[in-house]
Amino acid sequence: MFSDMVTARYYEEQLQEEYLEGKQPAFDISAGPIPGELHLASGHEASAAGVCQHLRPEDTVTAPHRPHHVAIAKGVDLERMTAEVFGRKTGLSEGKGGHMHLYDPDVNFACSGIIAQGVPPAVGAGFAAKKRNTDNVAVAFLGEGAISQGAFLESLNLASVHDLPVVFVIEDNDWAISMPKERVTDVEDGSRRAGGFDMPGTRVDSDDAVAVYEAAGEAIGRARDRNGPTLIELQVHRRMGHFMGDPETYRPETDSEGAATRDPIDRLADDLRAHGVEDEELDEIRDSAHERVDDAIEWAVEQPQPDPEDAYEDMFVNPMSGVTESEPSYELEGGEE
Ligand SMILES: Cc1ncc(C[n+]2csc(CCOP(=O)(O)OP(=O)(O)O)c2C)c(N)n1
Ligand SMILES: [Mg+2]
């Protein structure tokens, strides 16, 4: 967990530097090696590390627009992910997705800039796992700002009715862009949404990766054992603006300061030291994480840009053969309809 967390933090620190190149002084969002928006997850790391520790490559994870810590913890290929963030041809989606649309079928990971959009597909993956009689599970991450969306609420219902192996993970960082949580929902603890769907719900309040690990272990174990879905809410903190370049004029200073003092990486480091892990060992983990990140970025920036004409490739899935010419036929092998 510590390794995943320091990898994600350092990765984003490096991306910040690359991102700002060429964008100043007037903040031209389209300029520089990483054009477009960039949402960083500094302060969210305990969530992804504690949850994904329990997952295998066959398990599905969907994430929202703030995805790097989750992708790293799920084991997404760091080099191809970085090439994607830089919009390069060898990126996970050939440079067409960017940082909010990472997709790695090798480890069943996807994310989307449309908030709560990843939740129904995770339920679909849970359905598939059940139909195929596997013990795979699916985990959907979303922000607290998305918990009143229909897609999320319908997904909770479907997962509960069908007893699907799905875990819903709300990352509550108190903010949805500039909108404080209390102005959009009267439910202080988002995991209480679970009660309306007869599903277990739990909340971890402490930015503590170990507590996240324990809560997630129980929920994921329940899903694997075919005992149905769980909703978890994790308190995290947004240590930065909503996106790079956000002046945060809406945010009280005390709130930013509070987030800075609740660093989940410092907390886990203190825990590890209390359990006898030497500083030297923690430094080694950090050093190898940094090396891995530096290598990935070095590789990515040398990758070719996509050709402009590639923009029109892979935009739509072709219809199933025969569907457009004649009556739809979905006959399965063996004649079963
Ligand atoms: C369906 C939809 N509506 C609005 C937006 C614009 N938008 C992007 S991020 C965001 C707030 C997200 O807040 P939260 O879910 O709490 O995630 P956080 O950014 O705090 O991690 C909004 C409204 C969007 N991307 N998708
Ligand atoms: Mg939020």
Image (cartoon, helix red, strand yellow):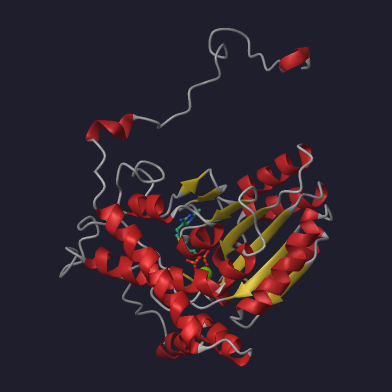
Is there any visible trace of residue 314 in the rendered image?
A: yes
- Residue 256 lies, in percent from the top left, at 43, 85
User: For this view, does 222 lie left or right of residue 76?
Assistant: right
Q: Quadrant of the C terminus?
A: top right
- Residue 125 lies, in percent from the top left, at 66, 44
- Residue 194 lies, in percent from the top left, at 76, 64
Decide which of 188, 306 is in the foreground and name it.
Answer: 306
Q: Number of callouts in the render? A: 0
Q: Is residue 298 above or below residue 303?
A: below
Question: Residue 63 is drawn in which quadrant?
Answer: bottom right
Decide which of 136, 147 is in the foreground and name it.
Answer: 136
Say which residue appears at 63% left-offset and 9% top-offset: 327
- Residue 45 lies, in percent from the top left, at 52, 72
Is there any visible trace of residue 37 in the rendered image?
A: no
Say which residue appears at 38% left-offset and 53% top-offset: 79
Q: Quadrant of the N terminus?
A: bottom right
Decide which of 148, 163 is in the foreground and name it.
Answer: 163
Which residue reaches farthest top?
Answer: 326
Q: Is residue 224 above or below residue 20?
A: above
Question: Residue 197 is drawn in which quadrant?
Answer: bottom right
Say which residue appears at 36% left-offset and 55% top-offset: 82
